[in-house]
Image (tube, rainbow, N blue to C red):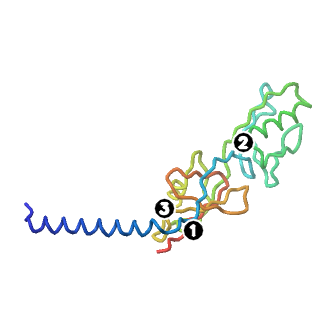
Amino acid sequence: MTSPIWHTRRTLLRGLAFGVGASALGACAGAPAAPATTTWQPVEYRLGPSDQIRITVFNEPGLTGPYVVGAQGNIAYPLVGDVRAAGLTVPQFTDALREALSQYVRNPSVSVEVTNYRPFFILGEVQRPGSYPYVVDLTVMNAVATAGGFTYRANRGRVFIRHANESVERSYDLGVTTPVMPGDTIRIGERIF
């Protein structure tokens, strides 16, 4: 059972804490807004070097099998030679391959799927920075966990991501659903305080 004096002190402390918090909020209301942050926009996946794909051509077992996008962005494919893959979406590559094959196969039915994506990279304030294999529906929080978690200095509210097809990194709010794409470079910065 608590004494009436203790109850009175606790009530006063709560009131004081609320008053300080309210005055701090009031002071912040007149402060200029923080710069706008970049919001995540869905990006359609584009093939790139080291992606492993499976090409299936209906009724053509000699043209069906696994292939890897080479360093130059091409796939060496039977009958047609090098076919450009880097920078294309899977449907665009499928159409390009179908068109190339149509010179040798009547009405080719082509199906392409990515079987192994290129890795992502994570650096900065994580325990084990480096390159890791990409998995479907990867988020920044999953990537951080894969890299051993945050260091004690990590800024857990912001993340910097450079997509494989971009030359600059962008800043994003770090949330549980912030996605990662194959080939992305993720940087976890250091907190200011």
Q: Where does label 3 land, which residue?
A: 149
Whether label 1 touches label 2, CB < 8 Å = no
Which x, y percent locates residue 22? Answer: 34, 65
SS for dot 2 = strand
Question: What is the CA distance from the residue labelled 3 to the residue labelled 1?
Answer: 11 Å
Measure how far apart labels 2 and 3 are at the Cα level: 31 Å
Question: Badge 1: few (under 14), some or many (20 or more) residues near its Cα, within 10 Å?
Answer: many
| Image-based side of 91 in relation to 184, left or right | right
Looking at the image, is mark 1 or mark 2 earlier in the sequence? 2
Question: Which label number is shown at residue 15?
Answer: none
Answer few, some or many: residues within 10 Å of disc 2's Cα (few below 14, many 20 plus, some between 14 and 19): many
For the point 79% across and 27% down, the residue is 109
Quarter holding residue 12: bottom left
Q: Are marks 3 and 1 in contact (CB under 8 Å)?
A: no
Q: Which quadrant: the N terminus?
A: bottom left
Percent of width and height locating residue 77: 84, 41
Left or right of 76 in this view: 177: left
Q: CA distance from mark 1 to mark 2?
A: 31 Å
Residue at the image point whose x is 58% and y is 59% from the top: 172
Q: Identify whether 42 is placed above or below 171.
A: above
Number of residue marks: 3
The amino acid at mark 3 is Gly
| Residue shown at the point (59%, 48%) measured from the top left | 135
Give the residue displayed 81% in from the left and 32% down from the top: 62
Say which of 181 and 7 sits in front.
7
**Residue placed most toward the observer, 155 or 71:** 155
Percent position (x, y) of residue 190?
Answer: 53, 71
Residue receiving disc 2: 53
Residue 44's spot in the image, x, y percent?
A: 69, 45
The residue labelled by disc 1 is: 124
Q: Residue furthest bottom?
A: 193
Of badges 1 and 2, nearer the viewer stands 1
